Amino acid sequence: MSAADPWQIIVLDETTSTQDEGRRLVSGKPGIRRAIRARRQSSGRGRLGNAWHSPEGGLWCTLTLPVPDGPDPFYNLLLALAARDSIASSLGNKGLRLALKWPNDLVIGNRKWGGVLAEIAGTSTSPEVLFGIGLNLDVEQESLREHPGLSEQATSIRVEFGHSPSPEQALQSILSNLDRLIEEDHSKGGRERNRLRVAEVLDTIGRHIHWKGPADRTGEGEATGISPEGALIVERTSPGPPGEEQLRSAEISHVRIC
């Protein structure tokens, strides 16, 4: 993945999903770094195909990125970090409250205000990644309540801080931050520096968690770190004997210890 080529920015009034639009564009004209933003989505989706409600005032966007060397799962976390840092920088010291929850959520405490996901597109010889971004930015509480399928813990930057950057401002900052992180990642020692940046704001580390992975495999343990490949490192406490494990794909819950 390279940060050398400029971004082609496409803005739509409404679409079913920017991921669908990204897949269509990659199929017709591959090899272009695009940022596809919609003011509204009628059928947005999150990780594992979950519905993502997309009221006006949020950032609903897909980045299409050619990956000639193949997808790198760590870049999903880099995009989340770029989004977190971009919004945090607009909030001053209050932005320090913004954090990441592995593998793809942006949170304030236990309240989710955004998420990212990655899907593979293109062909086996010319693969691309569609990185979806969904951020509740300038969205009022009433708009969140209009969608009964949303978690009660869903929130927005405006709800939490009383103001928010616009989707346009947020996207420009995210693209700039992502390019900077990609350039860093390609430099000597850059992956380790980026890993530490992610770990610093990853609220999952140090938590007791419960996870559900592929084939409904479950477990509990303490999250202790993040690998250079983006896997969550955990000290498993159950089931079975204790031991270190690396989670590469799982749904996790932060468990309260009473």
Image: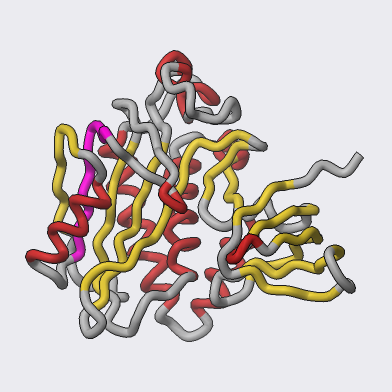
Q: Can you give x and y, in whole percent of width and height, for residue 206 in the image?
A: 78, 56
Q: Quadrant of the N terminus?
A: bottom left
Residue ID at (27%, 51%): 19
148 w.r.t. 222: above or below? above
- State which region is magenta: 33-42
223 w.r.t. 30: above or below? above
Circle count: 0
Indicate whether residue 247 is drawn in magenta.
no
Mostly what secondary structure, the magenta segment? strand
Residue 172 is left or right of residue 206, and the answer is left
Residue 147 is left or right of residue 30, and the answer is right
Residue 15 is left or right of residue 93, and the answer is left
Residue ID at (34%, 52%): 132
Q: Relative to the observer, which residue lies in front, 193 or 137? A: 137
Indicate whether residue 36 is drawn in magenta.
yes
Residue ID at (50%, 22%): 159
